[in-house]
Image (cartoon, grey):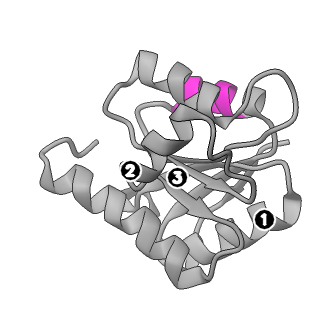
Amino acid sequence: MESTFEPGCSDNLSMPLVLAADDEPFILQYIAHVLQSANYRVITVNTVDEAWRIFRRRQPEIELVLTDVVMPGSVDGMDLAERIHQLDPSLPVLFITGALSESDPRTALMVEKQQVLRKPFFPKQLVDFVGAQIQRQSSSGLAR
């Protein structure tokens, strides 16, 4: 089920919109609270299928996708990123995980590109992780 957490601010449409996907409701609440406090708008979903539906509906608005690597079902967070990048190659997709497979070559690439944050993480780590990627997008001229 989709949940939208947006700060109560009249100017909130100018704040970056983050789509967050994780199968753990507590993690989603934590992410939404932390990012909302840092002036992000957040849509939370708990399946890859929901994330894909929301992405396709709100693609122009979404500035960053944050997904757990390991998700229930046949499609995981890395597969979601591949789907998203087929439609929008410039959209940043970042990963959070408590289980990082060292043997998966995709994992090594995520670590090398600084696209993964290991659970558990502190609020400042999450805000810095998301903020750095959005800043990179802005400074590279690829702002959405």
Pointer 2 residue: 112
* Vertical order, 44 against 32 (above or below): above
Q: Position of residue 71 (x, y in %)?
A: 80, 39
* Vertical order, 91 against 115 (above or below): above
Magenta stretch: includes residue 9? no
Inspect the image, locate mark 2, and give the three-letter code of the amino acid beneath it: Glu
Q: Is residue 52 left or right of residue 16?
A: right
Pointer 1 residue: 27
Which residue lies at the image location 80% right of the left edge and 36% below the top edge? 47
Using the image as rendered, state which of residue 26 and residue 108 is in the foreground.
Answer: 108
Q: Can residue 8 be seen by looking at this rendering? A: no
Pointer 3 residue: 18
Question: In 3D space, how far apart are the residues under numbered discs 2 and 3 (Cα atoms)?
Answer: 22 Å
Using the image as rendered, state which of residue 5 and residue 102 is in the foreground.
Answer: 102
Question: In 3D space, how far apart are the residues under numbered discs 2 and 1 (Cα atoms)?
Answer: 24 Å
Q: Can residue 46 be seen by looking at this rendering? A: yes
Q: Position of residue 119 (x, y in %)?
A: 69, 67
Identify the image quadrant of the N terminus: top right
Q: Earlier in the sequence, mark 2 or mark 1?
A: 1
Q: Secondary structure at mark 3?
A: strand
